[in-house]
Amino acid sequence: MEIGLTTATYVVAAILFILSLGGLSGQESAKRAVWYGIVGMALAVLATLFAAGPVNLHITAVMIAFGALAGWYVANRVQMTEMPQLVAALHSFVGLAAVFIGINAEITLTDVLAAKASGATETFTGFAAVLAHKSPAEIAVLKIEVFLGIFIGAVTFTGSIVAFGKLAGKIDGKAKKYPGGHALNAAAALICLAFGAAYCMGVGILGADGILGSSFTQLVLVSLFAGFIGWHLIMGIGGADMPVVVSMLNSYSGWAAAAIGFTLGNDLLIVTGALVGSSGAILSYIMCKAMNRSFISVILGGFGGPQQLTMQIEGEQLAIDSDGVAAALNDAESVIIVPGYGMAVSQAQQSVSELTRKLRAAGKVVRFAIHPVAGRLPGHMNVLLAEAKVPYDIVLEMDEINEDFPNTDVVIVIGSNDIVNPAAQDDPGSPIAGMPVLEVWKAKTVFVSKRGQGTGYSGIENPLFFKENTRMFYGDAKKSIDQLLPMLG
């Protein structure tokens, strides 16, 4: 493919990626935005393949086919409740790819420089041909790019693996601090910088012929210590902050991709990585503000130490059956539904949609209140409700609906804990102190659909469950709501 056509295709793909990101900001345009992304990626892959020429094309085709089949298989098996951990797992692949490409670039560069030094006249192809024509200054810049790509990629890889484990329940979701704490991360970062500087300057540590004199060894050690940083950082972040972690790792994967783009000289990969990295960073910052978290504190692994619950909780959790809930709904004029991860776990979104339809048909005002970090992934609840065909105009964000709770007859909380926890406002010692929450307790009556009396994902007790106007509607959310449907009307 001619270089001009390749460049033009890259420009079109980049525009489609930008349109895709812009469209994802609204529920109504999200479906079209996804297709923009699909078409843009297809164009990018085809342009890259044809621009590279026939070098190992058959191997590349087999790998693409294998990856496509694996993606299709996984996508068909993964439930919506598992989307957060799937996203985390996919981030890890980007990070690992950055590490492999960086190390491969160094191996290729070493071979090219050795061949040129020996006066060999062999013809280089592919990436080696690009490296063969670089000046010493360009090679110095390339080494910086390789180091940054490996460092960011390794942090992303191990951090994403830990995030996957926490979201999937395979690793305890509570924050774990290890002896040395942040000093370990700082020491590992300094070691990475030392090895990175030695690699970029082409000098050995403890002697050029020693075990640390090889540039390959230095990069492997950078990847190992950076991997430790990623693992230790995310282990130190608790479950309440996991939505921010997923967004943050998304940003890291973008910057890792951009570093790969610089290494390979691929302009589209640079643009795409920058788009993902910057948008992920912006989203992480917005979510930190929504949770009253320090952005720097979260990305450094919960800097500042844990807080302890100091407010004494009085009273008891009072249960209610489906008859009582149905009677209250039939008498109510206004209803607000607050969905959380429990709705996703029980796959109750279709039942919630039918409940909404029946209540609205009876002339009641029904709306949904969505907290910015509801679920375990940004926009998780919005996607579930859109899947169940809940009208977009009744799905409102926290800032749009929080003032309406005092004038609401019934609030139904489905599988939420931290985002409706009054301790965030009333207890300065709570781990979520200062976090903006949905003030559901101000409504006339609150029903909490919950499996049992345990705490939520972050392990924080919720005083809402003990308030006089709150009743616990125990059981699986889908089964509980299905029981209500025949009683309404």
Image: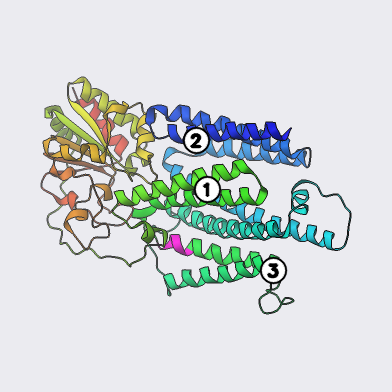
Q: Earlier in the sequence, mark 1 or mark 3?
A: 3
Judge by depth and name the residue closer to the eye, 35 or 320: 35
Q: Residue 254 has which mark?
A: 1
Secondary structure at numbered mark 2? helix
Q: Which residue is the site of mark 3?
A: 202
Residue 38 vertical placement versus 371 (above, below): above
Majority secondary structure of magenta residues: helix
Horizontal relation, residue 314 to residue 383: left or right: left
What is the residue that sits farthest to the bottom in this orientation? 206
The local crowd at label 2, few if under 14, some if 14 to 19, many if 20 or more residues have their Cα within 10 Å, is some
Q: Position of residue 250 (x, y in %)?
A: 48, 48
Front tag of 2 and 1: 2
Measured Cα–Cα span from mark 1 to mark 3: 28 Å
Residue 171 vertical placement versus 52 (above, below): below
Q: Which residue is the site of mark 2?
A: 18
Measured Cα–Cα span from mark 2 to mark 3: 39 Å
The residue at the point 70 percent across, 37 percent down is: 49
Q: Earlier in the sequence, mark 2 or mark 3?
A: 2
Secondary structure at numbered mark 3? loop
The magenta segment is 232-236
Front tag of 1 and 3: 3
The residue at the point 44 percent across, 58 percent down is: 171
Measured Cα–Cα span from mark 2 to mark 1: 14 Å
The residue at the point 27 percent across, 65 percent down is: 307
Q: Position of residue 370 (x, y in %)?
A: 29, 39
